[in-house]
Amino acid sequence: ATRQVNGLLDKAMIRNKTILVDLQRMFDTADSTKSGTLSLQEIMSMYSRHLWQLRPSQTGASKNMTMEELKAGDPEEFAREVIQAMDIKGDEKVTYSEFMAYSLGRRKHEVLLHLYDLSNGAARSISPWLIGRELEGVWHTGVVVYGKEYYYSKDTVYADAGDTSFGKPTRIVRLGYTLWRQDELH
């Protein structure tokens, strides 16, 4: 994530020489405990004091609210939107890296693991006879991100999520989030 953020900063600094200083100041002002992470309370404080006007977006560009929108809105709601948009680890906090990545245009994309039991449940009953112990299944997996499912079949291929020749996934495991864009993957 740090390498991605540094690359984005390099590009952003060509367009706006003070962006790093501005973003650093914005984060440091909010980080009242100097912990390197922003809590819900710290973010709420920024909105309550009308120091942040950012209205985050999960997919596209965020927008700045007018002072009227900021005064009429709920600081807790705004803070929760920030955490929802920026928190990659799911710890209800925003780290400096998460803040910078979001501020420089990165958006998080959920990553899932689809597991398919190729035996359709038969592995449980047959495996003790064949190998002397019970297997839960004979697994094939696919990684799902950007609405696509990536899996290996002689080569790495992809299809619409859940629309592969393996049928419906037996299990779905949430792996977390990525900041990589689809065009960087393929």
Image (spheres, rainbow, N blue to C red):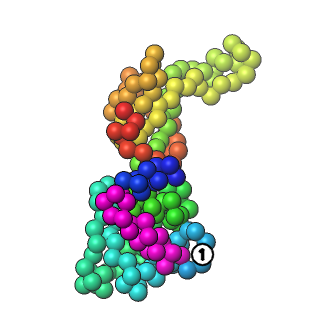
Q: Quadrant of residue 58?
A: bottom left
Q: Main secondary structure of the magenta part?
A: helix
Q: Could you say which is closer to the camera, residue 120 or residue 49?
A: 49
What crowding class fits label 1: few (fewer than 14 Cα within 10 Å), some (14-19), or many (20 or more)?
A: few
For the residue marked with disc 1, what is the amino acid?
A: Lys
> In the rendered structure, does residue 19 fall within the stretch colored magenta?
yes
In the figure, 39 relative to 161: above or below?
below
Q: Is residue 61 visible?
A: yes
Q: Which residue is mark 1?
A: 34
- 62 displayed left or right of 171: left
Q: Residue at x 53, y 64 (%)?
A: 95
Q: Could you say which is closer to the camera, residue 6 or residue 63?
A: 6
- 135 displayed left or right of 115: right
Residue 144 coordinates in the image, percent (x, y): 43, 38
Residue 180 coordinates in the image, percent (x, y): 42, 45
Residue 146 coordinates in the image, percent (x, y): 36, 42
> In the rendered structure, does residue 164 fall within the stretch colored magenta?
no
- So how many labels did they put on this image? 1
Q: Is residue 177 visible?
A: no
Residue 47 coordinates in the image, percent (x, y): 39, 80
Q: Residue at x 50, y 37 (%)?
A: 113
Q: Residue at x 52, y 64 (%)?
A: 96
Please, what secondary structure does the residue beneath circle 1 have?
A: loop
In the figure, 168 relative to 50: above or below?
above
Q: Quadrant of the C terminus?
A: top left
* Range of magenta residues: 12-31
Q: Residue at x 60, y 21 (%)?
A: 123
